[in-house]
Amino acid sequence: MKDTTIRLIALASVLAAGTLANAQISSFDTNDEGWTVTSFTNPNAGDFSILSTSGVTYNSTGGNGGGYVSKLDPDSGDFYFIAPSAFLGDKSSATTLSYDLIYNGTADYQTFDVALVGTSKMLIYRANPSIVPGANWASYSVSLSPASTWTLGVGGPTATATDFADVLSNLTGLYIKGEYTSGVVETAGLDNVSLTPVPEPASVFVLGLGALALVRRKRSGR
């Protein structure tokens, strides 16, 4: 029984490691990993005119474990963290976007939280209830699947499975909101961004066989 349990734990670790290997993660442990910031004129109204594009500040400590990146509000627009090229391309297997936020301003202003841009479509995510970051790190997880929180463009219809397939098959832009205050006074911090896929079906099948073996051994008393 003990040996079988150990083997199952090892198998689960392999499965987890395989999933992690296929995930795209920015932990910011050594540098900013190519993340930048863009400020849009009025994205709530669908105006994506760019007021400014700039780098982020890399902080080697103070993150939600290790380093993180931050940005002081650059102007009167709405700023978003922009993912680097490693997060783009064919992300068809991605099912979840997760990230951590910290914020030193008073969150009193809401725009959309995440934008996924493809070759011909933009998917917009507005959290419900609204994300309200604060002075302590908070973690957020966004399911990349049809729901009332996802629309096709700003104010468009609910995004469909086909829309997600079209966008994730060739992701050209990933934007995470950093602007939560109507004034130009706040700093937003970002950490532990990941695009995570589901485990490969074969791996899940193997894990299931291991669990079945454990049950059989337990019933036989060995």
Image (cartoon, rainbow, N blue to C red):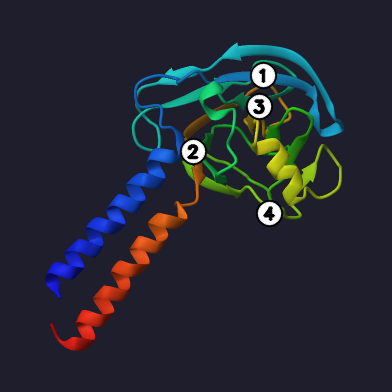
Residue neighbourhood size for the residue with mark 3, other residues' Cα within 10 Å, grouped as few (<14), some (14–19), many (≥20): many
* Nearer the camera: disc 4 or disc 3: 3
Residue at figure coordinates x 63%, y 46% from the top left: 131
Give the x, y percent position of residue 1: 15, 75
**Residue 160 appears in view:** yes
How far, Cα to Cα, is label 4 from label 3?
A: 25 Å
Answer whether labels 2 and 1 touch (C-beta < 8 Å): no
Tell me if 32 is positioned left or right of 7 in this view: right
How far, Cα to Cα, is label 2 from label 1?
A: 20 Å
Residue 173's disc number = 3
Residue at figure coordinates x 45%, y 39% from the top left: 23
State the SS at label 4. loop
Residue neighbourhood size for the residue with mark 4, other residues' Cα within 10 Å, grouped as few (<14), some (14–19), many (≥20): few
Q: Tell me which label, 2 or 1, sits earlier in the chain.
A: 1
Q: Tell me which label, 1 or 4, sits earlier in the chain.
A: 1
Q: Quadrant of residue 179?
A: top right
* Nearer the camera: disc 2 or disc 1: 2
Tell me the amino acid under the disc marked 3: Gly
* Label 4 sits on residue: 129
Say which of 39 and 12 sits in front.
Answer: 12
How far, Cα to Cα, is label 4 from label 2?
A: 21 Å
* Nearer the camera: disc 3 or disc 1: 3
* Label 1 sits on residue: 38
Q: Quadrant of residue 50?
A: top right
How far, Cα to Cα, is label 2 from label 3?
A: 14 Å
**Residue 110 appears in view:** no
Tell me the amino acid under the disc marked 2: Ser
Tell me the amino acid under the disc marked 4: Pro
* Label 2 sits on residue: 194
For the C terminus, the image quarter is: bottom left
